[in-house]
Image: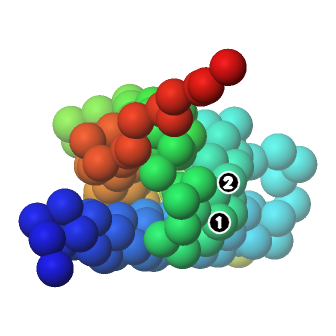
Amino acid sequence: MSYIETKGTASRALSVFLRLGEVICATIVLGLLGRMFYLVDNAGVTEPNARLVFAAVIAGMSIVAGLVLMPPMAYTFWSFPVDIFFFAAWLTVFCLLETLTGIDTCDSEWYNTYWGYYWGRWYLVSPVGVDGNWTGCSAWRSVLAFSFIACIGFLLSAILVSSTSPPFPERSF
């Protein structure tokens, strides 16, 4: 087994593990946001926060792309543009979600009047504006953390794919 064959085998295995990690991160984000949408729907709110909807759409697209690109086949090493797109999309998701709460995370105004309010089902017992008392704080922090990890996963996939892609075949006329 030559050095080139070993490098190809290692990069394909690493690519599969990165794709699996990306799919897992996107699934966690989508699951937590889906639960939030369920709670918002139970409260009778007509529209959930648009940033959360954007994050859910990117998570769903990432799951599909990750599953399609996971098998180590020849076409998966041409997926550099897809990885760059999802890296930028997940970076946007993370930045949009982080700016909702800023550095205060679970003490912010938005958290207490939206995420904590609906996650804790305060709409059943209290008026809007009730302090969520850290209800769902771990879920919110998980959404932020896994959106950032997915972003880094797609960046690493893009770097791996660009460094191991075979050159363009030469044409003979």
**Nearer mark to the viewer, of 2 and 1:** 1
Determine which quarter of the picture holds residue 67: bottom right
Q: Residue lying farthest front?
A: 173
In this orientation, does residue 52 appear? no
Q: In the image, residue 19 lies at what x, y percent?
A: 43, 67
The amino acid marked with disc number 1 is Val
Colour mapping used in the image: rainbow
Query: Which label belongs to residue 68?
Result: 1
Q: CA distance from mark 2 to mark 1?
A: 11 Å
Q: Are marks 2 and 1 in contact (CB under 8 Å)?
A: no
- Which is more toward the observer, 129 or 90? 90
**Residue 165 picture location, percent across and down:** 38, 44
Q: Position of residue 78 (x, y in %)?
A: 52, 44
Quadrant that contains the N terminus: bottom left
Q: Secondary structure at mark 2?
A: helix
Say whether disc 2 or disc 1 marks the residue closer to the N-terminus: 2
On-image quarter of the C terminus: top right
Label disc, if present, on residue 61 of the rendered structure: 2
The one nearer the camera, 80 or 22, is 80
| Residue drawn at 34 percent across, 69 percent down | 12
Q: Residues within 10 Å of mark 2 (few under 14, many from 20)?
A: some
